[in-house]
Amino acid sequence: MNNIIDVKNVTKIFSKGIINKSFTRAVNNISLNIDSEKPMIRAIAGESGSGKTTLARMILGLISPTEGELFFQGQNINKLNNEDRLNFRKSVQPIFQDPFGVFNPFYKIDRVLNTPLIKFQVSNNKTEIKDRIETALNSVGLRPDETLGRYPHELSGGQRQRIMVARALILEPKVIVADEPVSMVDASLRATILESIYKFKEEQNISVIYITHDLTTAHQLCDDIMVLYAGNMVEAGPIDLIVRNPSHPYTKLLVNSIPFPDPDMNWKKYDPKDRLKLDVESVGWRNK
Amino acid sequence: MSKILEVNDLKVYFHTNLGPVKAVDGISFSLESGERLGLVGESGSGKTTTALALMRLIKKPGIIENGKILVDQKDLLALNDTQMREARFSEISMIPQGAMNSLNPVMKIGEQLKDTLVAHRKYSGDQSLSKQQYRSIIDNLLTSVGLEKNVAKMFPHELSGGMKQRVTIAMGISLEPKVILADEPTSALDVVVQRHVMETLQNAQEKIGAGLILVGHDMGLMAQFVHRIGVMYAGKLVEIAPVKTIFKNPIHPYTKMLIRSLPKLDSHGRFFGIPGLPPALLNLSPGCTFCERVEDFSHVGEPVEWTMISKDHEVLMCGGCEKR
């Protein structure tokens, strides 16, 4: 097996209600894999409710699929023994969307960075822990002396998100799953955060799954892309090709909706019919 | 076109135990009717505070220290509280940032729209309208933002994010104000919905012929939507020009970096972040604050001056900024 992550035909169905059960197919029959030899940054794009976060949570092992299987280095991630699970959790690291919700306001920043090193038994040596933390902070463009020893409320959203990036990096993972890491960060700070994610791949051979609805940052960062619509994969391939020459109507809609930073490039008029056509096509199987 | 809004030397300070925080420090601009002006800047640059000050909604310890806000020649700062309450929504209205949190969850949409009509206007008291009249006004408002009439009978949780944001737009235009302030109206929405909401906003604004100020940090959205852009940095307006000029010929180094940091379709794998951190607004040094950030210490503290680049293009910078 050459794939670190192997997702095979996964489907996730959420059900609600006891007597009148209703079902939502959040993710429908999706496969993807990440090669261990060749690190890459792969985008999963789609609107709210398209199933991209559900897919990410399955890859992280936070929820299990209804059908299909996920493999980490050839082992089913929902059937790992304790030791392998620890290794899986260490090797596949998340970065979440909201830099305001992930910190416990009562603890200093140091704790977020210390705890994973101790829990995963990477090191018990205080100087080594300190070294690792400082290297990680430096690599995301933060100065350790200005950051450590502070409380979360003393830092800006951009700084907090960079700390989350450093936290993911500190365990030397093989794969990082980044769920909209810059959508709640100022536009002027996005470039810095994306750059550090890009450097993971270039310098440390870490593969990244980048989840987003913003095709411009995806284009800047990623090698290839998978577009989800209502839980289905509708288009996948090299990012440059797909952004420049989309063929599925939904991908076209996404590309046309990008607000290009150029006043001469006009936004095409939004036509609700585009959307309607799509909904009619996909609504049939969504609620089975 | 006539000047519908004039802001002169507006200063908003927050008085803390450590001294005044100068959130907005002497900004001036004007807006014509039918014009759309964008205010861009990072978090803490004072753009939202400016919008709140225009509505006179600054809370303690914040105080509007100085300045004039003229809406159609009427100074808002000279009004008493009752008059200001009447002016809100009928003269100047605001579309808030998170539509999710700005609607009352236990009140039907129609009732909330009616509330705006009753509270801020002539319709109250003896001039109150009949039920049917209110209903037809509300139906028209909902139709004008592209929503079905039966939305009036729904609760906010039954609507999607984009629909909620369109309800707040309907509220913002309900009394046909002369100026609309939109504070990042689409920051919580995905790109497709964003385009739809911005189009709705544009149609509504053009229909009533109001001036509009769009507050935000997304330069892409600005490029597609506004006529003029004002760039804010550390409580000051540092550059103001028509949108095409800003993108083709930015002068202030902050504007240049802001534009360069945007992802473009030919920039795969290349990133241009803005170095440093935004300055703390407490005890800000009197001179150029941007040179300090980019570590050009030879010009720190140098006084800044307004420079006229062309007829409608003005920049506030120091000698160091000019050379960058």
Image (cartoon, helix red, strand yellow):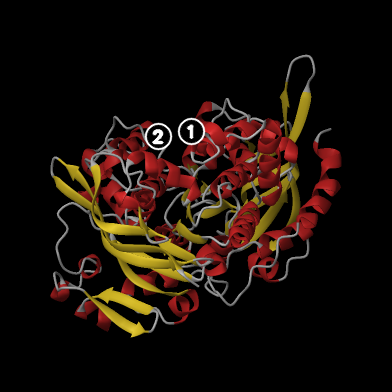
Query: Is residue B48 among the parts visible in the rendering?
Result: yes
Element under disc 1: helix
* Disc number for residue A120: 2
Query: Is residue A27 among the parts visible in the rendering?
Result: no
Q: Residue at x 68, y 31 (%)?
A: B131
Q: Is residue A17 left or right of residue A156?
A: right
Mark 2 / mark 1, whichever is N-terminal: 1
Along the line of sight, which residue is nearer the eye, A70 or B258? B258
On the image, which quarter does residue A164 sit in?
top left
Q: Residue at x 21, y 43 (%)?
A: A127
Q: Is residue A136 above or below residue A112?
A: below
Q: Is residue A134 left or right of residue B247?
A: left
Q: Is residue B260 above or below residue A112?
A: below
Q: Say which amino acid is labelled 2.
A: Phe
Residue that protrudes farthest toward the top in the picture: A19
Q: Disc 2 to disc 1, how far (Cα)?
A: 7 Å
Q: Say which amino acid is labelled 1.
A: Leu
Q: Residue at x 85, y 47 (%)?
A: A280
For the residues beneath circles 2 and 1, the answer to whether they share a chain is yes
Along the line of sight, which residue is nearer the eye, A54 or A264? A264
Circle 1 residue:
A86
Q: Residue at x 29, y 59 (%)?
A: B68
* Disc number for residue A17: none
Element under disc 2: loop
- Whether pointer 2 and pointer 1 mark residues with C-beta atoms closer than 8 Å, the reply is yes
Residue A244: image location, x then y, percent:
68, 71
Along the line of sight, which residue is nearer the eye, A150 or B251? B251
Residue A85: image location, x then y, percent:
53, 32
Q: If the image is split into quadrants, where does the C terminus of chain A sit?
A: top right
